[in-house]
Image: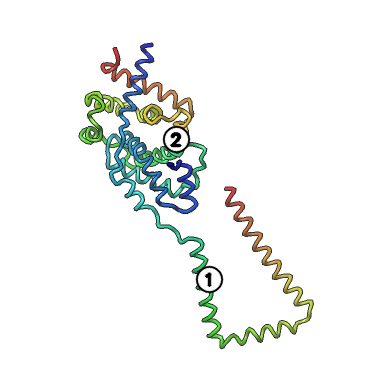
Amino acid sequence: MDENFQEDWLDTRLRDEAAYVDDGGFTARVVQKLPARPVRHALRAVILLAVTLVASTIAYLLSGGGWFIAEEVTRFVLLPMPVILLCAAIATGLVMAGGFALAMSRASGRLR
Amino acid sequence: MALTDADLVARVLLDDDHHAFAELVRNHQSSVRGLLRQLVRADVSLADDLAQETFLRAYKNLRSFRGEARFSTWLYRIAYNCFREEARKRKELVGIDEALLEAQHDPQTTDPALRHDLAHALQLLPLHERTAILLCCQNGLSHDEAARVLEIPLGTVKTNVLRGREKLKRSLAAWGPN
């Protein structure tokens, strides 16, 4: 009984010793040192789109109005049909492989 | 309604919400700083530097907090690792600063002499016993939680608490109930 009482006494004293430490600006100092927030995903997409548009416009103007695109499209259309189908199949395969790789990397990241 | 630690952690992870993280710091700064002050033997400035490092590491590694343990237990573990690294750097821990030790306590709650004796008795304990006592008896962690924080077996924690308590009781025998 006395032993239990002594234990309670010690626990009480130890808990008393853990006095509340006043914040005193500590939280503000920690928050100030946090790394800057990364650019949000939506903003990043807008920036990427804008940069792509500007770069495309510059490339279009520098290439003389994009005449070479029309020329290459004409040459492509004149190719034999099996070659066109093969190109389309390869392009489709590349897009699917890219999408699959992206999906796999996201899934493994979520599992980790 | 106050948000739980889990809610705040989710907000930080989803929106990188600094306000939510500030709330977490506010909620836990007292216990983390208090523990570190005891561990570094009342060097308030060093303890606060370590506490700041603790919260910054917590922020950077928040994704590794899986919610299996209490957030406070996870924080104590980071704090203890910070302390261990600092102790390793310094080789030996700093001495007791009596003036600071007395200044940080409210003299009205307990007899200052008892407070002084208890603090002194705690400082005399070996580090492993002192840490176990501080975590379990002062900060309310279970033996299992303390074992996770200290990364030692559960049985060792129980032994350290038991031995530490015995030594404290002997040191403070004059203050104990008759």
Q: Is residue A4 above or below residue B149?
A: above
Q: Residue under mark 2: which chain is it in?
A: B
> In this view of the protein, which residue sits in the foreground, B14 or B101?
B14
Judged left or right of residue B152, residue B111 is: left
Using the rendered view, name the quadrant where residue B142 is placed. top left
Residue at (71%, 85%) from the top-left corner? A75
Q: Is residue B123 above or below residue A54?
A: above
Q: Residue under mark 1: which chain is it in?
A: A
Judged left or right of residue B80, residue A110 is: right
> In this view of the protein, which residue sits in the foreground, B86 or A89?
A89
How many neighbours does mark 1 have within 10 angstroms: few (below 14), some (14-19), or many (20 or more)? few
Q: Position of residue B162 (x, y in %)?
A: 40, 21
How many neighbours does mark 2 have within 10 angstroms: few (below 14), some (14-19), or many (20 or more)? many
- Local secondary structure at mark 1: helix
Q: Which mark is residue B141?
A: none
Q: Position of residue A51 (x, y in %)?
A: 50, 73
Q: Which residue type carries mark 1?
A: Leu
Using the rendered view, name the quadrant where residue B114 is placed. top left
- Give the residue pinned by disc 2: B149
Q: Position of residue B85 (x, y in %)?
A: 38, 41
Looking at the rendered image, the disc whose residue lies closer to the viewer, 1 or 2, is 1
- Give the residue pinned by disc 1: A49
In this rendering, do the residues under marks 1 and 2 share a single chain? no
